[in-house]
Amino acid sequence: MALSTASSTACTHTSALPLSHQLVLVTGAGRGLGTHLARSFLEQGARVVVNYRRSEEGAKALVADYPERALAVAADVCDRAAVDAMMARAREHFGGPVTTLINNALPDFAFDGDARPGPDELTWAHFDHQLQGVARGALNTVQAALAGMREVGFGRIVNVGTNLFQNPVVPYHDYTAAKAALLSLTRTLAHDLGPDNITVNMISGGLLRTTDASRATPEAVFELIAASTPLRRVTTPEEFADAALLFASPWARAITGQNLVVDGGLVKG
């Protein structure tokens, strides 16, 4: 489906685009938080590439709700050739490059504190698994998207982080280390890409109620976190997705290199 002439013109060398003129790629969008992120952009009129690795059924179900503006594409973000092919498929289908990138894909992981490897059991393989999926995956998608963003003079990159940097209530050592690397990449990329009118930001949530990754979390943990937040409730995936809309919107055109914590006020700054 090609972009209309009006949309194509609007996408050319502008400091900010309305969400309805953006072509958004959400990685890991076939399930969990990724589905909520993709749906939030679709509800705002954006065109969305629904990336998935194994969750084909979920990705295609989402596309079925928005057949004119959504496209499901399978690709492992750790595979640069597959990511390049996904970008090419998006351009072919929508008639223009990806303008907005949401790096949400997460290697296989369950937020179950009782099952996490402790300091004595940790291996480098745990860290490598997370670093590959989080940091390498984001590097692949960013590099694959840059030419298209520079072509239209506009880009928005939003990386999904965690508030466990500031509040390691459950020390998921490997997961948190990978997200810390992603925060560093966020800030250094923001410095380098600012002159191209490409902003790079991170959203760091806490425990979300509920995603596929948090289904293993005991109810007592949800209750403890809810009681500890000023809002007295656990943040939802839909509320988290609101922050992604903000960073992609014209209202955030001067915001880059930031890490916004979205957890109901549990963690400050």
Image: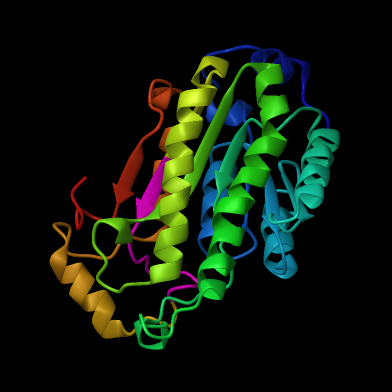
Asked whether 210 or 79 is in front, the reply is 79
Question: Which residue is located at x 71 percent, y 41 percent?
Answer: 69
Above or below for 80 versus 11: below
Q: In this view, does 143 lie to the left or right of 129?
A: right
Question: Which residue is located at x 72 percent, y 26 percent?
Answer: 147
Question: Within the image, what quadrant is residue 42 found in?
Answer: top right
Question: Within the image, what quadrant is residue 112 found in?
Answer: bottom left
Asked whether 11 or 88 is in front, the reply is 88
Residue 19 inside the magenta-drawn segment: no
Asked whether 75 or 19 is in front, the reply is 75
Question: Which residue is located at x 68 percent, y 34 percent?
Answer: 145
Q: In this view, does 192 lie to the left or right of 47?
A: left
Above or below for 207 versus 116: above
Colour scheme in use: rainbow
Above or below for 83 versus 194: below
Image: magenta residue range:
202-214
Q: Position of residue 138 (x, y in %)?
A: 59, 47
Q: Position of residue 260 (x, y in %)?
A: 33, 43
Question: Which residue is located at x 17 percent, y 61 percent?
Answer: 229
Asked whether 164 or 96 is in front, the reply is 164
Above or below for 150 versus 184: above
Q: In this view, does 130 lie to the left or right of 266?
A: right
